[in-house]
Structure formats: structure tokens, C-alpha cells
Amino acid sequence: MAPANVRLNPVGLIIAGVLVICLFFYIFGMPSLGKENISMRELLSVSVDLAERGGRRVREIAEAHNLEAKEKGKTKEGAAEMLTTGDLESHRAIVHGFSKTYPGMTVISEEHENKPVDFSQIEDTNKLRSDVMERVSNDQSIAMSRIAVWIDPLDATQEYTEGLYQYVTTMVCVVVDGEPTMGVIHKPFTGETVWAWADYGHSKNLKKASEMKPDDNHRKIIVSRSHAGSVQDVSKRAFGANTEVVPAGGAGYKTLEVIKGNVEAYVHVTLIKKWDICSGHAILKAVDGMMTTLDGNFITYSPEDTPKNEGGLLATIYNHYDYLKKLTPEMDNLKKSHKR
């Protein structure tokens, strides 16, 4: 029997080739000619590693009673902004770690220092942490020029100086084209670390919003310790008489309480810096929660933008627009309430 004469359709081959190429770019990202590409999964591993490294310095300094707290400025409302050795040492641990691992990467930190660094003395980072590799099976390659990292080396410094360590966190946030993409929040005094990469995976101690059940009969709203009394009446009018206002320190801690479902919403009525909220925003996004200004505007994190978010803040794990709708009639009172 003569062999079959197989003819391949050139058009079909071209279409199949294009589909394969498109699938490759979808999984691994578009190539950027002449630009260094970064494995996002490795970057997540490094981010977790460095958030915990900074946290170790924060805890060690507290245990050695070596805070050396001083005032570095004042908030818009006149409250003192504190700086401690813990802030600076955590800043060095995290920023220098990124600079050694990813030279040239844009890193934005709450603290600033221009001293020369001997990178031979900086410990290498772990790009292949088992907890990340096990929970994130896929990867994406992105040009480093599109990436920026926002760092809060010690969130809740005031509480740190008061020994209220439960509120203290170290935070790392990765943004791509200004969008919060990866977030890490580490609690130095309990050892807990929460992380997420939107659409790719999250730490095992997180749940999606769909796995939680809201308690509409007893809402809890978390606010800054300094704002609790003045925001309480406004919150009860907006959300109901059974609303409980929970005072707490640290934007990272408060956002994490929302993410865990321990409270229904986090409301902030004054200016807040983006390094305080970027990590929580990225994690919320990954578990289908939301964070916006009090006017419902989205918050972006381009390194060219101002680090100030002046529109207030609403963070929720579910029913975000319902909370916004209920806040709207009280918006003027809410923005004025902290001054009373």
C-alpha cells in the first residue's frame, strides 16, 4: 500500500504558530527588548524575605531597649511623627537587600538615607522560598522599568515607642505600571506574615472574600486611635446604631483586620502616605476586597505621583460600594469630625 500523501495547510500552520506565541506571552508576559526582565515569582519571594528581615531588626532593637526615639516632623494635624533606630535599621535591611538583588530597581521608602553601602556585607536574599514556590505555581516575566517597590520599614512607630507591639508591621508592596500587584505584611512580634500576588496566589493564612460571611447585624469599623471618638457618631449614623468603632494603630494592622474579616471596614479621614497603604491594597485586591478614597476614587502608586493620598480611605472585604453609598450623606461631617 502506498504511503499517504499528507499535505499541510500553510494558513493553518501560521494560525497555530500565532496561537502558541500568544499563549506564551500570556503566561510569561510580553518581552521588552533592551530591558531587563524580572521573574515576578522570585520578586515575591525576595519581598517576603526582606519584609521578615526588616522585622527581625525591629524586634531585636525593641528587645535591646535601643529605640532612640526622636521627632522627625509633624502631621498635617500637628501630631508628632516619630523616628526610631528600628525604623532606620529596618529601612537599611529592606532597601539594601533590594538594591543588591535588583540593582537599578525603583524603591520608595518612608525613610531616607544617603550613606555609602558595602554590598559585600549584605546578606543574599532568597528567591526561591518554599512557602512561595508551593503556593504560586505560575510565573510572569516583566520589565524592571515597569516595576516599583513601596516600603514601610516600620508601620505604627508611635505604638512601637509605647510598647504596643501588636500594631507594628513591616510592609513591602510591588506595583506594576502604578497598580498594586503584590503585598507583604509582616508582624515582627508574632512572626506572622501575610502575602499575596493578585491573580496568582496568596499565603495559606489568607481567605478569599467569597469564603467569608458578613455580619450585617453587628458591623465593626476600624479607625485610627486618635480618631475613634470623633468618628464614632458619624459611623453610627452611616452604618447603624449597632456599629462598633474599633480604635487601632498602624495602617498595616488595620487593613489586615479587614482582610481577615475581623472588621467590616477601615475608615481613614485624613491624609495618609502611600507606603502605609500599598501593601494592604495589593493584598485586598488579591482576595477580592477593595480600597478607594472616601469619594470612591481609585488610588495609584506610580513612582512619579505624589506619595500623599489626601482623599481619605475606605477599605472593605465585601460590599464596598454599599459602604461608600452609606458614607456619602455623612461625608462632610466625616472629614470634619477629626478636628472636633
Image: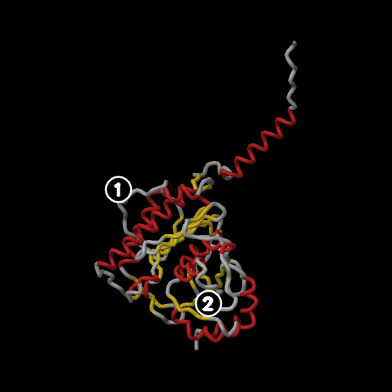
Residue shown at 47% from the left, 56% from the top? 204
Residue 81 visible in rendering:
yes
- Foreground residue among 322 and 149: 322
Indicate which label's residue lies in the foreground, 1 or 2. 2
- Foreground residue among 175 and 215: 215
Q: How crowded is mark 2: few (under 14 residues within 10 Å), some or many (20 or more)?
A: many
Give residue 332's quadrant in the image.
bottom right
The residue singled out by tag 1 in the image is: 120
Where residue 165 sits in the image (x, y, percent)?
Answer: 35, 71
Q: How many labels does the image show?
A: 2
Where residue 136 sits in the image (x, y, percent)?
Answer: 50, 49
Q: Of the two numbered discs 1 and 2 on the same chain, state the one appearing first in sequence.
A: 1
As measured in the structure, the alpha-carbon distance from the residue carrying label 1 to the one carrying label 2 is: 47 Å
Q: Is residue 277 above or below residue 201?
A: below
- Left or right of 6 on screen, residue 30: left
Give residue 116's quadrant in the image.
bottom left
What amino acid is at disc 1? Answer: Ser
Where residue 102 sits in the image (x, y, percent)?
Answer: 42, 49
Residue farthest bottom in this picture: 340
Q: How crowded is mark 1: few (under 14 residues within 10 Å), some or many (20 or more)?
A: few
Under tag 1, what secondary structure?
Answer: helix
The residue singled out by tag 2 in the image is: 221
Under tag 2, what secondary structure?
Answer: strand
Give the numbered dot on residue 14. Answer: none
Residue shown at 53% from the left, 77% from the top? 220
- Left or right of 26 on screen, residue 102: left
Q: Are marks 1 and 2 in contact (CB under 8 Å)?
A: no
- Left or right of 230 on screen, residue 91: left
